[in-house]
Amino acid sequence: MTGRPTRTWKRVLAVAASIALGATIAAAQNSQGASHAVGDASSVPAPANSSVPAASTRPNVDYVIGPGDLLSIDVMNEPDVTGKVPVRPDGMITIPLIGDIKASGLTPDKLQANITSKLTEYVKDPSVTVVVEEMNSRQFNVLGKVLHPGSFPLNKPTRVLDALAQAGGFTEFAKVSKIYVLRRDATGTTTRLPFNYKRVTNGQDDQDDVLLQSGDTVIVP
C-alpha cells in the first residue's frame, strides 16, 4: 500500500519539474527574441517624416538668369516680400522694400545673396531663397516647313531631333536632307551646322544631332 503513493508523488514531482523547465526555456527564448528585435529596430532607416532634413536639390543652381525668366523669391516670415517676379527686358526685377535690383547675368545663388544683403537694412537676419520657375530667356527656334514653327524653351538638354519633334514634324515637300542649324557665337559670327534627317535617323552622322544652345535656329527648307 505504501509503494503506490510514493510512485504517484514521484510522477507529480516529475510533471512539475517538466513544467518549470519549459517555463524557463520559454523565458530565455523570449528574452533572446526581444534582444534581436531591439537590434533589428536600430537598423531600420528613419521614416520619411523624420526630423533629419533631406538634402536640398537645386537643379537650376548654376543657371544664369536672363530677361523673360520668372523667379520665385521667398523671404521667410515676410509675406510682403515673397512672391513670383518676372525679369524685365532691362534685366532688372522689382522687390518690395528694396526696389529695383539687377537679376540678369546672375545665378540664383548670387541674386539670393544680393537680395539678402539689401534686405538687412529692413529685415533682421533675412532668410532668402531664389528659384527660377520659368527659364524663358533660354530658347531655340524652329523655322521653315514644320507643322508648328516658332520659339521653344531650352529648359533641358535638347538635340536637333528633339527640336523637330517639338515643332510637330515636317510639312509636305520639306527637304529633310537639307536641314541646318544657325548658331551665333559671342562675337556675332554665325555658323551653319548641317543636319540630314534621313541619315541621322538611319544611324548615320550621329554627330550632326548636336545639343542646341540658347539662340540656335533650326531651319527646315
Image (cartoon, helix red, strand yellow):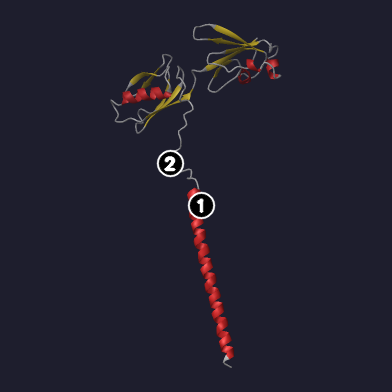
* Residue located at (54% from left, 20% from top): 154
Pick the quarter of the image with the C terminus: top right
The residue carrying mark 1 is 40
Say if 20 sits above or below 43 in the image: below
Q: Is residue 7 left or right of residue 124?
A: right
Residue 155 place in picture, x, y as percent: 53, 22
**Mark 1 Cα within 10 Å, few/some/many (few <14, many 20+)?**
few
Q: Position of residue 113 (x, y in %)?
A: 36, 24
Query: Label 1's element?
Result: helix
State the CA–CA distance, disc 2 to disc 1: 20 Å
Left or right: residue 89 compared with residue 210: left
Q: Quadrant of residue 172?
A: top right
| Near-viewer residue (165 or 4) | 4
> Going by the picture, which residue comes out furthest to the bottom?
1
Q: x, y percentage for residue 78?
A: 34, 31
Amino acid on which disc 2 is placed: Val
Quadrant position of the N terminus in the picture: bottom right
Identity of the residue drawn at 49% across and 53% down: 39
Task: Name the residue type under label 1.
Answer: Asp
| Percent x, y of residue 159 | 60, 19
Secondary structure of the residue carrying numbered label 2: loop
Q: Which residue is mark 2?
A: 52
Nearer-the-camera pick, 79 or 65? 65
Please tell me which residue lies in front, 121 or 55: 55
Marked residue nearer the N-terminal end (2 or 1): 1
Give the left or right position of residue 77, taking residue 220 as reference.
left
Q: Residue at image x 52%, y 70%?
A: 23
Which of the 4 image quadrants contains residue 194?
A: top right
